[in-house]
Amino acid sequence: MRRGTRDPGLVGTHQEHASELAAALRSAVAGEVDFSAAARALTTMDASNYRRVPAGTVAPRDAADVAAALEACRAHGAPVVARGGGTSIGGQATGTGVVLDFTRHMGGIVSLDPEERTAVVRPGLVLDRLRAAARPYGLTFGPDPSTHGRCTLGGMIGNNACGAHSVAWGTTADNVRSLEVVTYRGAELTLGRDGRGAPPGLRELVGENLALLRTGYPEGLPRRISGYALDALLPERGVDVVRSFCGGEGTLGVITEATVRLVPLPAEPVLVVLGYADEGAAADAAPGLLPYGPLTVEGMALDLVPDAVGLPRGGAWLFVEVDGPDAARRLVRAADAVDAAVVRDPAGQRALWRIREDAAGTATRALDGGEAWPGWEDCAVPPARLGAYLREFRSLLADFGLRGIPYGHFGDGCVHVRIDFDLWTEEGVRHFRRFSEAVADLVVAHGGSLSGEHGDGRARAELLPRMYGAELVGLFGAVKDVWDPDGGLNPGMLVRPGRLDEGLRFGGLSGTDLTLVGVGRAAARCVGVAKCRVQGPSSGPGVMCPSYRATGEERHSTRGRARLLHEMAIGEVITGGWRSEEVREALDLCLSCKGCRSDCPVGVDVAAYKAEFLDRHYAGPLGLLRRPRSHWTMGWLPHWLDVFGRGLNAGMRLPFAARLAGVTPERTLPRVAEASFTSWFAERASDRPPALTLWPDTFTDHLSPEVGRAAVRVLEDAGLGVRLPEGRVCCGLTYVSTGQLGAARRVMRRTLDVLDPSGSSTPSGSSAPSAPSGSSAPSAPSAPSGSSAPSAPSGSSAPSDGGLPVVVLEPSCAATLRTDLPELLPDDPRAARLAASVRTFAEALEELAPDWTPPRLDRPVTGQTHCHQHAVLGDAADRRLRARAGLTGDLAGGCCGLAGNFGFEPGHYEVSVACAEDRLLPALRDAPPDAAVLADGFSCRKQIADLTDGRGRHLAELLAEGLEEEAR
C-alpha cells in the first residue's frame, strides 16, 4: 500500500479481492471471520455523521489472532480499523477494509493488583466491568465518559477519552502505564516511558524537531486531545512513548493488552449542585472552584433541562462532586451561586447524574422535536476562557441560523454540543462546512483544542492546520509513516484526512418507495451512542435491549437493527429491500418490548419499524404463504377466541396441536376460561352511574377473567361505577406485533365504530379483518352498533358518551391504544381521543377516587414492571398506590421474555428464558418468602408460571384480596 494514500480500500476492487482475503483470514485466525452483508452493514457507522463500508469483520480471540489478521490484511493490501464499542463521534470506528471487533472475545481482565493499584486488561473490556471489579478494593478507573456502560478500554485509549472526573484524575493517557501493541507490519511492541517500545526512527525524528514540539502546542489546556501528543516524547517529559500513543485513533498500532492505573474511590462522595443566572455566569465561576479539589465540575444550562425538576434555582448549573460533607460546605461558601443543593443520598445523586449522562442523547433532539447532530461535538478551551468562548459560540450559532445546546466539563473548559445541521441537502452540507471552519477559528482564537474528548476523526482532522499550523501537522504525517509506513491502519484519520463534508451517512436515503425512505430516515435518527448495548448493573431500571442482553450480538441491539434498516433503505450493502433476509433475521429476536421507545436517548422505535417491515416483507400472495404459522394463530388470537371461545381447549389437547399452531414444543398453551369476563359482567346488576369504561381486553376477557373481576371489586369499593363497551372491542395489539397492519387498522376502526358510532369513518366492508387466506374459518363478526367511547382530556371534542376515561388492565393493550392506535390511524380524530382517554388501573384510582383508602396489605412484593408500562405508560401512579397499600419493595426492570407471541414461537425459547434470567427470575429468587409476585401483564404471569413454581398476580387481585380480608 502506497504511503500517503487517502482513505484506501482493498487494492483493486472490494468485490475482486474480498473473497480471497476472507479465505486467508479464515485459515489464519481462530476467531470469527464474517464478510456477510449483515456484518458489513452493522459496521458501516459509529456514533458520528460518517459512513464507510468495510470489506468484512474479524473477531480475534487473542493477540496471536490479531497478529495473524494483520499479516493476512497486509498481504492483501487491506486496511484495518480496530473497533470497540463503536461509539466514536468523529468516524474513527469505521473503515473500508477489515474491522477488528474486540468486544466479542477480547474483553476480559487479565489481572487486578489492588496493592499496586493497577489492572491488566484486554482492549474490548467495557469500562464498567473494570470499575465493578475494582470497586470491592475501594478503587476505580478514573476516566469515566458518559458511555461508561458500553465504551471499551481500547477505544478510550485510542481516543484518549476523559469523562466527568478528569479534573481530579486526568485523561485516559494519564492513567495508562504500558501497552502491548502490534503494528501493521507485525512488530510486537511493549510501550512505556524512557523511549520503551518506540519503533525505529521515532526518537531520531523527535530529536530533529525539538523546537517545534516545545513551541507548537497550546498551553494551559487540560483537554488537548486533537492530533498526536508528540510533546510527550520530549526528553524533559520522559520520552513517554505510551502517552504519545494514546489518542492515536488506531492509526499507529493495534492494542492487544493494556496496564492501567487505578485510583481510590472517594470515601464519601457528595454532589453539590450550584445554580447560576445563566450559562456564562456558570462558566465564569467554574475555574474558581478548582482550588477546592473537586472531583467533577460539570455544567449545563436551562435549555438542556427546561423543567429543571430537582435542581436549585437558576438558569444554569454546575454539578460539582467533592469528597465529604466538610468539602461540600467549603465549596458552597466559596461559590458565588444564586442557589445551591447538597445531595448526600446516593439515589438522589444517581438521579441527578442521569440527567447529565443522558445529555448526549437528549441534546440530539431539539426542543421542538427537530434533529440535532454531532459534528462540532467536544472542543475545549482553557477553563478561564470558557465563559467568553461560550458567549461568542452562541452568537456564532445565531449568525448561522443554527441551534445547539452546549453542556459539558466546565472545569476542564470542554464543551459538548449537538447542532441542528441540515445534513440531508447539498446546501445544508455546505452550510455545515462553513460553520465548522468558522467555529474552528473561534476555538483557536481562544487558545483551544478542536477536540477535547472524542478525537478528531473525519470530523475535525482536516481543520488541524488551523490549530497547529502546517509544519506540526506535517510532522504528524511523518510520525504516522514511522509507525505505519504502509498506511494500513485506519487510513484517513488524523493524518492525510478526507474532507469533513464527504462520506456523510445521510446520503442515499432517497427513492420512489416513500415508506422505505421513511423507515430509513427514521432509523437514521440513531446516533450510535449505544445505550442499547449496556449489560449488567449499569442498565439500571430500563428495558432496552433484552435480546441484546441475552445474545450479546450487535444485530440484536437497537442500534444494530437501526443500522440494518438504514442500510436496507440505502440499498448498497443490504440489497433486498423489504425482502431482506438480513433484516428479517435481526428483527426476529426483537421482542417488541418498546423499551427503545423510552430508553433510547433519541427514541428509536424498533417495535414500530419491525411491524412495518413484517407487513411489507410478507405482502402479496406469496408473502402470505411464507408467513410463520404463529402469525395466523397468535396474531389472530382475538378473532379465534371470539369465534371458538373455550372450544379451543379441546383443540389444544389434540396431538401435534402446538406444532400445528406454530408454537414451540417447550411451551404449554394457555387454557381458555370457562366463563369470560364479559359474560360474568353481563350477569351482574349495578345501579351505580358509570364513572369509567373498563376495557375488556382479549387476555383479561378469555384467559384471566379473575383479573377483571378483581378490578371491578376494587373500583366499585372506591365508589366508581363501571361499564363495559356495548360491543366487541380490540386494541389490535396481536396484529401489530405480527406485522399485519392492514388487519390491525380494520380491527381498530371496528373498535372505534363500537365506541364512537356517531363519528364513524370506517370504509365500507372493512369493519373486521378477514380470515387468513386459505382458511375455512368464518370472518370475525361485525361489531354491533352501541355505546360510545371515552374521550380525550379537555380541549378535545368529546364522543357521545360524555367522555368517560377508559381503564385498561393489560399494559400491552393500554400501550397499543396510547401509541399504535393514533399512529396507525392518524386521520381519524376518534383514535386520538381514545388514546388520550386511556388510563391504567392505578391512574384511574388516583385520578377518579383520590380520597379512597386502599386496604393495608403490609407485605413485600417482587416481580417486574411490565416493559410496555415502563416504555409508554409510566409506573409512578402504581408505585404510589403500592406504597399506600403497604406493599414494599421495588420491581425489577427489563422484559419477562415471553412478550406475547415471541416466547411461543419456534427458535425463541432459549432467548425468552435468557431474558427472564436477566432480571425477573433473579428478583423472584432473591425475594422474601412472603413476598407477593406482581405481574400486571398476562405474558409476564404466563412466563412466571412456566419457569417457576410461583404465580404472578395483577395489582388489582392483591387489592381485591385485601378488601375481602377486611370484610371478613
Image (cartoon, rainbow, N blue to C red):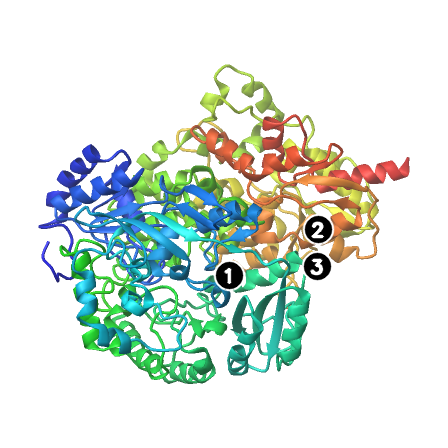
Residue annotated with mark 2: 879
Residue annotated with mark 3: 802
Q: Position of residue 864 (x, y in %)?
A: 62, 41
Front-lying residue, 209 or 647: 209
- Mark 1 lies on a secondary structure that is loop
Q: Amino acid at mark 1?
A: Asp
Q: Look at the numbered discs 1 and 2 and tell me whether their residues touch, using CB distance below 8 Å.
A: no
**In the picture shown, does residue 778 fall above or below 252?**
above
Q: Earlier in the sequence, mark 2 or mark 3?
A: 3
**Residue drawn at 75 percent across, 40 percent down:** 860
- Distance from disc 1 to disc 2, alpha carbons, whole Å, reads 24 Å
Residue annotated with mark 1: 358
**Residue drawn at 53 percent across, 43 percent down:** 733
Which quadrant of the view contains residue 760? Answer: bottom right
**In the picture shown, does residue 707 fall above or below 434?**
above
Which quadrant of the view contains residue 110? Answer: top left
Q: Amino acid at mark 2?
A: Arg
Is residue 470 found left or right of 411 in the rendered image?
A: left
Q: Earlier in the sequence, mark 1 or mark 2?
A: 1
Which quadrant of the view contains residue 160? Answer: bottom left
Q: Earlier in the sequence, mark 1 or mark 3?
A: 1
Q: Mark 2 Cα within 10 Å, few/some/many (few <14, many 20+)?
A: some
Task: Pick the quarter of the image with the C terminus.
Answer: top right
Q: Mark 1 Cα within 10 Å, few/some/many (few <14, many 20+)?
A: some
- Distance from disc 2 to disc 3, alpha carbons, whole Å, reads 30 Å
Q: Amino acid at mark 3?
A: Gly
